[in-house]
Image (spheres, rainbow, N blue to C red):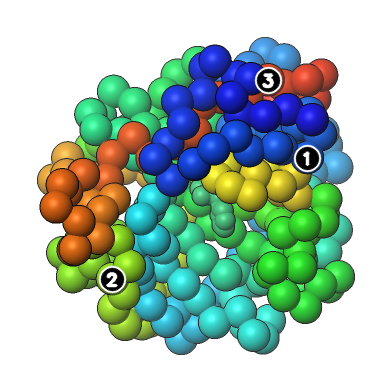
Amino acid sequence: AVTLRDLPAVKLHPMWQGPLVVPGGDRQSPIDIVVRKSVFDSELKPLVTDYDPQTCQQIWNNGYSFLVEYDDTTDKSTLKGGPLQDKFRLCQFHFHWGESNAWGSEHTVDRRLFPAELHLVHWNSDKYSLFEEAVMEDNGLAVIGVFLKVGRRHEGLQKLVDALPAIRHKGSVVEFTRFDPACLLPTNTEDYWTYHGSLTTPPLTESVTWIVMKQHIEVSHDQLAVFRSLLFTSAEEEVQKSMVNNFRVQQPLCGRSVRSSFT
Ligand SMILES: O=C1NC(=O)[C@@H](c2ccccc2)S1
Ligand SMILES: [Zn+2]
């Protein structure tokens, strides 16, 4: 097993106290996607998302990112198709970003960094009955990754951006309803890369089928600046730390192949 301290490249994030033993550690995420080494697989289907905005419940600051959480007690907001054999339930989405627009994403494409990355987290509701169960199983989770670039203002994102000042501090939560996460997907959901990996934060379990979209979405500089106005720290702490660079360093591919749904 690999412990995080063995990996010099890992800057132990404040939330990652002490060495962490990663199960096996040979299918960790994120990775660099080397386009010319990805393997086209004609069996890969387009993604089929069916999200019900009514299942959107709250938005909160967990001290590492901000999460928009969905009611996942029924199959109302689901993902299927793509590389997946089963139906997966949306439980939350969140982002990772940098202190500058020069970096912030977790995955890279031919070493290219993006200023931020959206993760839509789903769990296998055909096989498991809870996220907490699925997170321990190797076909338990499916995460859609979408790269963000700075450009035009994203109208659909603005409702979320407007809610952030209310959750500046770690542990704050506000009600957040009727948000359709489909508005954050790129127009092209046919072209993606997929590989087997892990959570990118503790418990780092190797239970994720990653689906990284080829097409990015655009958000404005000002919208991204509001992400950076969030804090890692709670209201009680004397020293406030701005929530930036909440991404994990890239992990060894360990012989894995990345498949592409496009040529
Ligand atoms: O895609 C990922 N991003 C994260 O922050 C990781 C995570 C960890 C626990 C729950 C949901 C997601 S896995
Ligand atoms: Zn994430």
| Residue type pointed to by label 2 | Ser
- The residue that disc 3 covers is 252
Q: Is residue 258 above or below residue 77?
A: above
Determine the image quadrant of residue 30: top right
| C-alpha gap between disc 3 and disc 1 | 15 Å
Vertical placement of residue 119 versus 108, above or below:
below
Q: Which mark is residue 172?
A: 2
Type of amino acid under label 1: Pro
* Residue drawn at x 29%, y 23% as measured from the top left: 102
Q: Secondary structure at mark 2?
A: loop
- The residue that appears at 17% across and 40% down in the rendered structure is 221
- Mark 2: C-beta under 8 Å from nearest atom of ligand 1: no
Q: Amino acid at mark 3?
A: Pro
Q: Position of residue 39 (x, y in %)?
A: 78, 24
Is the residue 36 above or below the residue 11 in the image? above
- Horizontally, residue 208 falls left or right of residue 17, namely right
Q: Which mark is residue 229?
A: none
Rendered image quadrant of residue 68: bottom left
Expressed as whole percent of the image width and height from the top left, the position of residue 182 reads 47, 64
Q: Is residue 230 visible?
A: no
Image spot of residue 183 (x, y percent): 41, 62
Question: Position of 33 compared to 82: left or right?
Answer: left
Which SS class for mark 3? Answer: loop
Residue 174 can be seen, yes or no = yes
Mark 1 element type: loop
Q: How many marks?
A: 3
Labels 2 and 1 touching (C-beta < 8 A): no
Which class describes the residues within 10 Å of circle 1: few (<14), some (14-19), or many (20+)? some
Which numbered disc, 2 or 3, marks the residue closer to the eye?
2
Please give the residue where the numbered disc 1 appears in the rendered image: 23
Mark 3 Cα shell of 10 Å, populated few (<14), some (14-19), many (≥20): some
The x, y position of residue 249, in whole percent, is 51, 26
